[in-house]
Amino acid sequence: MATRFIFLSFCLLFSSTLTISNAKIFPTFPSSRITPEKLSSLISNSKDSQGLYKTKYHTQILDHFNYNPQSYQTFQQRYLINDTHWGGSKNNAPIFVYTGNEGDIEWFAQNTGFMYDVAPKFKALLVFIEHRYYGKSIPYGGYKEIAYKNASTTGYLSSTQALADYASLIIDLKKNLTATDSPVVVFGGSYGGMLAAWFRLKYPHVAIGALASSAPILNFDNIVSPYSFSNIITQDFRSVSENCYKVIKGSWKQIEETAKKPGGLEKLQKAFRICKSEKNLAIESWLSTAFVYTAMTDYPTPSNFLNPLPAFPVKEMCKAIDDPKTGNDVFAKLYGAASVYYNYSGTAKCFDLNGDSDPHGLSEWGWQACTEMIMLTGGDNKDSIFEESEEDYDARARYCKEAYGVDPRPNWITTEFGGHKIGLVLKRFASNIIFFNGLRDPWSGGGVLKNISKTVLALVEKEGAHHVDLRFSTKEDPQWLKDVRRREVEIVGKWISQYFQDLAL
Amino acid sequence: MATRFIFLSFCLLFSSTLTISNAKIFPTFPSSRITPEKLSSLISNSKDSQGLYKTKYHTQILDHFNYNPQSYQTFQQRYLINDTHWGGSKNNAPIFVYTGNEGDIEWFAQNTGFMYDVAPKFKALLVFIEHRYYGKSIPYGGYKEIAYKNASTTGYLSSTQALADYASLIIDLKKNLTATDSPVVVFGGSYGGMLAAWFRLKYPHVAIGALASSAPILNFDNIVSPYSFSNIITQDFRSVSENCYKVIKGSWKQIEETAKKPGGLEKLQKAFRICKSEKNLAIESWLSTAFVYTAMTDYPTPSNFLNPLPAFPVKEMCKAIDDPKTGNDVFAKLYGAASVYYNYSGTAKCFDLNGDSDPHGLSEWGWQACTEMIMLTGGDNKDSIFEESEEDYDARARYCKEAYGVDPRPNWITTEFGGHKIGLVLKRFASNIIFFNGLRDPWSGGGVLKNISKTVLALVEKEGAHHVDLRFSTKEDPQWLKDVRRREVEIVGKWISQYFQDLAL
């Protein structure tokens, strides 16, 4: 999940008039150090993508909700399918669907091993549907240069359109498989988890239940505090080492002051092994990116979701910072910490701060974050591991106008999907949703953390990070993670049994 | 409700190449014999519209689901409001909202007296929201000549947009009234009832419950038989008089044969007091319109919803047909029956068949019936009171292309809102919906006629007609009607009590 990344663009946009010391620090999306080729060779905890799925395409309508001529345009929507363990339509065997999020669907399929792990038990067909405007599911004949060109063509990129895409595709697929009575369960993590939960809420006639992992559906419209995100990151680091937290907390000022001094930028460039000299050395942004994404993916086993990382990477970062060998050299400590995130493979000789390669094709999240995905997570209170700051909606709105020519609709998501008093609303409405959250994940601040009813459940794991439950299982998985997945299998199993009982009536 | 009316246009469109005998007979919308002025003076069972409501406008966004520049256009959406009995925001007093259907909202407000009748008991605020593209809620600056011009401008007329309008307006209104905790219950009849039910399903965070009266949400995608509609009309007439049914059933052929003979058209024109001679004398359509709408509004008390009518108008029609005074003169019998519907006030001296005045502003239902409201009710089996015929989807599609330049999306409504196996789907999902249906109403064939769960309920009344429960109460109301309304009040009362209990937790 990368709502915050938009603010990097914001900083860059205005940085010519700002000194680095004033630039608000926000993380960017995954590092540019890893090429797509490298990444695919590095995929850990996953099978070779060869054999994981077959690729198919569905002719999708551009605009489900209107009937003007442009609404009728179509595009090819990609989906991945694996029927290795499927029990078949004659047995009404289940269909497990991943509601794709803001990137290449292959990347999500490769990082959602849970569905592969449980498919044999349920004899489930696996389907991973790509979100419109990402990966290979690009309207306008697949031409990104048209689809991403301006608001007229990008305008059809929205969550409601995506959900309607999934409904249409699933209904059509079931018809083609003559599997209209097969129960569908949807799965998703992060934005994909939000989509899974919303899909169950809006399309109960298509999906009998949803596993929404790390779905921050409450990070909108001030339902939760805009400080929750950075508070959790702060807590992640403090829980490992108070000294580590203090060093990071103190470093921002030091970087700022160094940058101001004559020769300071050169000093920073050298300290952090930045390849090229830059006028605006966004070291703070580069560092906070590492802290944010490491906190998000603070998994108990080695992983490669955003970047290749060791097990418990926050602990590894703090190990570097607390390392007595670096003495009082704060920059050396930070460099060591950043290297855990940016250079765990050890191959990078220097770092390119403003490189913008985007191996997972996430760029259009910027558009979504400027239209409807107005997730308010930008506040840093006094004790934050980052510099104190306020959520600045107006700045975002100005940026969005300039970058995309659009005005955000900050209340739309709660108008369409709710969120305020969600317990009151869903207590006697809806069923069969699991909200999983790991409390080490900064996005858990916007998650549903309490059971709402007997079938709208919150699974909360203190040690968990961003949709850790959805990853391929490994031999090293801790007991709590095994337990979470066992519970999820149990609950999904109940939904399916109940469905078959009801169907038989 | 007037899905069938579209086929009149269809007939007219192609009538130059068809003889009257081949023209498929379908009813049109309310008679053109009543001028708006006359109608408003005739409104029976209702208070003067003066004092029933105040008129307000809300700035509404044209397209909720996309972000291209045209999406951001706005229009003025009309709503009517009555706070006479409202208990106020401090008491979280309820808000009862009518989800407007395909016409002028004043007309629906005047015909939904139930809300006025129960407002004092619940201390409820009443709000009637007009559906986009109807009445005074016209996009493009209120100019119908632009809004209705072609698919580019009419394209934003859809049920999903309308539902999102209601959500946005209600949330905004509650904010302005500082009544965010006031429970909202939605009410609607016919298409408005479909919208009320769908609104509860899609926006449970905005409405705590829905009373969906005569909402034929199952007349789509072959969920129910396309013959159900005319079967019910047939049964309505047969239940009153088998002879009446036989006379009508036999008359179609006689009209057809008469029309073919030299001087036949003149004979028909004279028999039915048609003002002008016409090349295509659509007598069959004119008559079936009367039978359909009289069956729909076969209320137990005098009424004026579509046209002014006596109590039990089907019985009155059959009285005219069975009248021994007319002997064997079938046309005289039919003329007497038609006069019950078209000339109950007795003021018309002759009838204008092709007049197309539209006092309630329903014209754009034609667009809706050509895009998404593909309600399949056109079948007449051998025993139908009408001539035997098949539902002809292809003919509709061709007509729609020609008339509006659009291709229907016949599966969209069930994709978006479900309908297939609705009991299975909603048994363990959703709550607080009443589906009322009167079995004399032909639209009850597409209604939900069985309880789905303890809180998704079907109230079915053998003697009831089209949303009779929503009408103003009268002293002459039969006991069953009083009972239905008492049950509805009871159930809505439970929803509200439960909400307040939950809110207090």
Image (spheres, coloured by chain):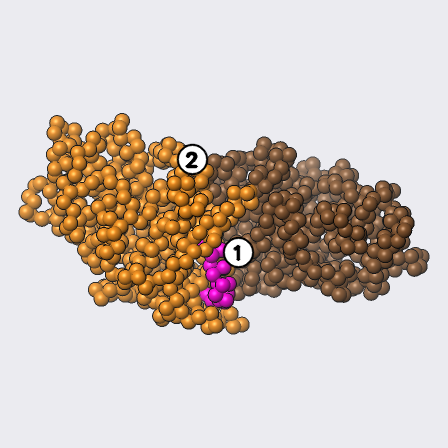
Chain colours: A orange, B brown
Residue appearing at x 51%, y 58% in the figure: B430
Numbered disc 2: secondary structure: loop
Task: Using the image, name the chain to which the residue with label 1 belongs.
Answer: B
Q: Is residue B361 visible?
A: yes
- 10 Å crowding of disc 1: few (<14), some (14-19), many (20+): many
- 10 Å crowding of disc 2: few (<14), some (14-19), many (20+): some
Residue appearing at x 58%, y 34% in the figure: B140
- The amino acid marked with disc number 2 is Asp
Q: Main secondary structure of the magenta part?
A: helix
Q: How many marks?
A: 2
Looking at the picture, how far across and down is residue A24, in whole percent? 26, 35
Identify the residue position indicated by label 2 in the image: A407
Looking at the picture, how far across and down is residue A130, in whole percent? 39, 53
Q: Which residues are magenta?
A: A166-183
Disc 1 to disc 2, how far (Cα)?
Answer: 30 Å
Q: Is residue B458 above or below residue B350?
A: below
- The amino acid marked with disc number 1 is Thr
The part of the image, by quadrant, that contains residue A334 is: top left
Identify the residue position indicated by label 1 in the image: B415
Q: Is residue A89 above or below residue B144?
A: below
Q: Is residue B175 above or below residue B323?
A: above
Mark identifier at residue B487: none
The part of the image, by quadrant, that contains residue A471 is: bottom left
Looking at the picture, how far across and down is residue B52, in whole percent? 67, 39
